[in-house]
Image (cartoon, rainbow, N blue to C red):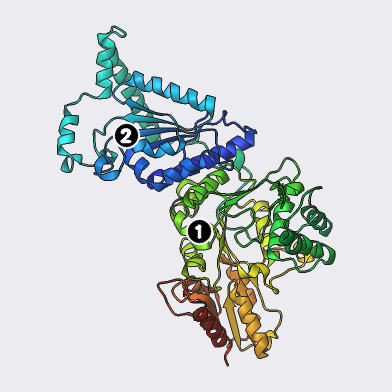
Amino acid sequence: MHCTLAFNPSHLEFANPVVEGRVRAKLERRGDHEGTSVVPVLIHGDAAMAGQGIVAETLNLSELPAYRTGGTIHVVIDNQIGFTTLPQESRSTPYCTDVTRMLRCPVFHVNGDDPEAVIQVVRLAVAYRQRFHKDVVVDLFCYRRYGHNEGDEPRFTQPKMYAVIDALPSVRTLYAEQLVRQGRVKAGLPDELRTRTHQRFEAALEETRAGDFSLLPSSFAGLWRDYVGGLEPEQAVDTGVPRATLDDLLGRITTAPEGFTPHSRIRRFVLAKQKKVLATGKNVDWGTGENLAIASLLAEGVNCRITGQDVERGTFSHRHATLHDAKTGARWNRLQDCATKDALAALYDSPLSEGGVLGFEWGYSLDAPDALVGWEAQFGDFANSAQVMIDQFISSSEDKWQRLSGLLLLLPHGFEGQGPEHSSARLERYLALCAEDNMQVVYPTTPAQIFHLLRRQVHRQWRKPLVVMTPKSLLRHKRAVSTLDELAEGRFQRLIDDDHVDAAAVRRVLLCTGKVYYDLLDGREKRGIEDVAIIRFEQLYPFSPKELRRVLGRYPANVDYVWVQEEPWNMGAWYYIRARLPQVASEGFTLRCLSRPESASPATGSKAAHVIEQKELVANALSA
């Protein structure tokens, strides 16, 4: 039997969905749809079982088609205390396992002082799981003899409880006496077994102290033998797709099955529009570029799994990966029609969960390095609810555990006047977590960019999480379009220079990232300005000093450099850019920032105020 122990930070139950995601990936790789070949086992503390919301999120995933793993065996170490908190202070239910009532699954409460009863219950639990493929719980009713982490002093806060515990013989002593009393073992054998066990432990300790770790398993063996971490490689990877292949894929995803009736608006605004792209090769919008990226990977035999609260349609109705018959409700997974080699187009709408679902997908990515695995937030700031996953796993796993992941995060971001809760994906938080090329943070501005970015994520051997600030208004912006030739022949660009101005005549260079570029571009054209250049930072991290020097070297030495961002001064990329740009630019380089004033709230809640702020921002950036 192969046993995998999941890495677990101190955030208690947050490893739960990670384990489930890993199991799902392993099962799918085996073609096991019932879940009999891999069994997830989750060990909980009683206080954490009742107190951590991620437990309920994970339980809710258990019977959903996108997350089913054939049932989980839950073992609760029910020791009557959470650090120093008593049960009556930590839960509102009689049992810490009452949260599992949502599944109506069996819960076996068993005395931890009775080893044979525990064994019987565990056998029942395993048999139930293998027979019915559903969750089952073993509540091991016991106590904690030496305090939290065996290093705390519990008698400070629970003196009466520990007076009782101190008087109790240990489980080993009780069971040894029982076996001798029943004549099942000879007197003295328990002590002999204890001595032998201690000798094995001492031998293992000495072996560890000798420092011979040559036989330790490598994190980069097995599935991961063809992939690397470390610093980002400089060499580019070919992400283009022949034009004929793109035409074929676009034809497939716009040709409905016989007898299928698309919604009238889908037929007009999605299928007909994409057929026109096929005919002209022009005006590829974001949804088309994204769908073609996934379709082309599926055609190469690459599994693509992306989940989120509205992934099939897309929160803003741009993707429509799965269409529903307007008369019958029948589903058409149009991307699956492009797959070869049994590749799966697994785009699933998720439950209303961020932490549980993101943790599941990160776990899945650990056992599917050759797939495109991602999570899309409904709005980018909703990732706040999954911050533990981002901090404890996604940004730090390579440094802590030497574990790589190519997980994709799609986070809608951009200031369109929708209010504080729907504007900012908190770009600054991800940039603050960046170090040692641990992950990628990008803010692409064209459909060609997202096309090549998604393909690059799979085709590079370099595996790092990819955080994408995705658009909202740019999904249908008349200028945020590409051509099929740009998808066929181009590649992802870290920086996009301004080829609409004479570099030698430029007096000011505006540096920006994302959606604000189009506002600046429109403002420049309306004012007839020809001496202001606009440079887009498409990849913010890993940072490329070489590329930046090449681009900035085209402009006069005395040019006025300005960083422009929609976000308030204390948010966005400004702090990050201010810290890094002067270190790599030429001597005498200075940079100032134009943004909204610093603010405790990401954005105003007034559409009128937003419009005024945005106009003022553009005007200041382009003023003489």
Residue type, numbered disc 1: Glu
Q: Position of residue 12 (x, y in %)?
A: 38, 44
Residue 504, placed above or below residue 277? below
The residue under the point 60% across, 73% down is 515
Q: Where is residue 462 in the image (x, y as percent from the top left)?
A: 61, 52
Query: In this view of the protein, which residue sits in the foreground, 274 or 384?
Result: 274
Q: Where is residue 372 in the image (x, y as percent from the top left)?
A: 64, 50
- For the image, the number of numbered tags is 2
Number of the front mark, 1 or 2: 2
> What numbered label is drawn on residue 78?
2
Asked whether, in this view, residue 42 is left or right of residue 461, the answer is: left
Residue sitting farthest toward the front: 327
Secondary structure at badge 1 equals loop
Query: In this view of the protein, which residue sits in the foreground, 624 or 69?
Result: 69
Residue 208, placed above or below residue 558? above
- Could you tell me if residue 151 is visible in this image? no
Query: In this view of the protein, which residue sits in the foreground, 62 or 147?
Result: 62
Q: Quadrant of the C terminus?
A: bottom right
Residue type, numbered disc 2: Asp
Q: Residues within 10 Å of mark 2 (few under 14, many from 20)?
A: many
Secondary structure at badge 2 equals strand
Q: In which quarter of the image is residue 532?
A: bottom right
- What residue sits right under mark 1 in the picture? 436
Disc on the earlier residue, 1 or 2? 2
Residue sitting farthest toward the bottom: 624
The residue under the point 28% across, 6% down is 183
Q: Position of residue 426 (x, y in %)?
A: 48, 66
